[in-house]
Amino acid sequence: MESLAQGLPAGADIPGLLLASVFMRMRASEHLCEMIDALAEIEANERSALLGSVEAVLQDLGTFIHNAWANEQVKGKDLRPALGFYDRMRARVADWGMPNLESELAIAQSVILDECLEDQTKALTVVDAAIEKFGRRPALIRQKSKVLRHQGLNDAAASLLIEIEDDIVHLAPFDQGLALRDGGVAAANAKRHDDALRLLRKADAVFAAKGSHEALRIGLTIDEAMVLWDQGQRAFALRRAGDALEAVEQIDPSASRQNLRAHRMARAVVGLFIHNVEVFPREPRPAITPGMGSQLESSEPPDPADLKALADNWRILEMVEVEAGVEAGIAKRSAAKQGASRVLSIETNLAKAHFARSLQAKDIGGAVRAIVPTMSFFKRLRGVLESKQGAERGLARADVSVLSPFGVEELRSSGW
């Protein structure tokens, strides 16, 4: 017991540690409500000391307040009964003189209404009433901003978070990062690019200081890349997309859903950028927007996923660099990531992009030099398309050792 006590943060004690562990094991709103009822039977000073210790252990009362309903949501349960339990808990704690606890319960009600029951009007009413009662607490303002963003009012949502930007430090560290991230996403959707970049980078700095959440930080990098692209800073956008590709090499996609999201989104942003530079896009625009990279996922292991090779995504990003007409250093970084084989369709399109870019730049010498490699890839790709079926045709690979250009006479004599 003495050893345990020595490792506790300031304001925490053994009873608070034990109670915190009980709270964190609760998986139902009904059980949390029973605990609040039990705490109501304890003398006020003892109750206050216990909950103060719990807050010190967990760093935030919201950690256990949201744990119960969040587990019910993950299990796909109807959250309407949970809403009733949280309403009962709010009424129970109203005379405890603990505004942190009561406002966190109000936030839980608002989140359930907003994200689980899709009733943004009531969700806004609940949080506005709490703001009127407790003032402009950062946690309440953050929740109101989230509801506004879900209503499509991104400019108003961003403005709210920016107004309290300097006060966000009063939130628990993880919530600080999420609040800044939420503000950045709202600002990005409102086309307030400078605000979005500032908030996303500040969110990343918060998580970096904690020394964890690598997958979430990669997601923020992906979000930043999309904002930079939308702002017209294509070279910087490509570099950040490259940073995300490099970063996901270091995390196992099967370890958690957050890791898998980072892997998928790092590849998806490359697909978005190539779609944006294609003269005649062959498919609908990829449905990804800022915020999807850093969207929170559970820590549970995901189902097995078939992920394409990162080396191929590097090659596509290199193609984006050529098509966009910018110098972002992607070709050099891509070269260091390549193996012994290439996807023929990607190599053909990359060669064609170099040829087209030379013509657009009136670099006739470069265009002439690009003709034979380009036509050689077309010839090889045509042969593959004639010999394979279905998905194999687009993903067919060839050894680098056999990809040297054909001779001019060989191309001419075979009709190319």
Image (spheres, grey):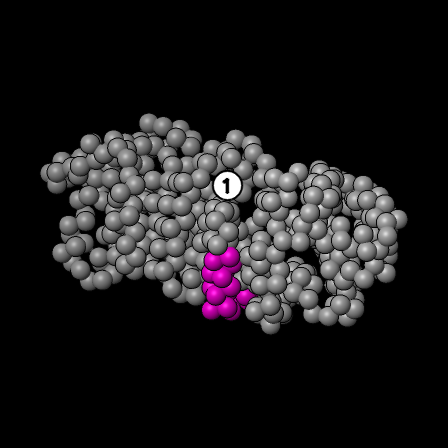
Please tell me whether residue 205 is drawn above or below residue 16 in the rendered image.
Answer: below
The foreground one among 124 and 34 is 34
Count of picture labels? 1
Give SS at disc 1: helix
Look at the image and tell me whether residue 119 can be seen.
Answer: no
Instruction: Give the magenta range.
Output: 187-206
Quadrant of the rendered structure where residue 395 is? Answer: top left
Side (left or right) of 237 relative to 353: right
The foreground one among 206 and 383 is 206
Side (left or right) of 291 relative to 250: right
Position in image of residue 189 (x %, y %): 55, 63
Q: Residues within 10 Å of mark 1 (few under 14, many from 20)?
A: many
* Quarter occupied by the C terminus: top left
Quadrant of the rendered structure where residue 279 is? Answer: bottom left
| Amino acid type of the residue that numbered disc 1 sits on in the rendered structure | Asn
* Quarter occupied by the N terminus: top right
Write the residue at 75% across / 57% down: 101
* Residue 195 among those drawn in magenta: yes
Write the residue at 30% across / 60% down: 326
Position in image of residue 152 (x %, y %): 64, 63
Q: Which residue is mark 1?
A: 259
Please tell me whether residue 61 is drawn above or below residue 24 in the rendered image.
Answer: below
Position in image of residue 406 (x %, y %): 16, 37
Task: Point out the residue furthest to the right here.
Answer: 41
Write the residue at 44% across / 46% down: 266
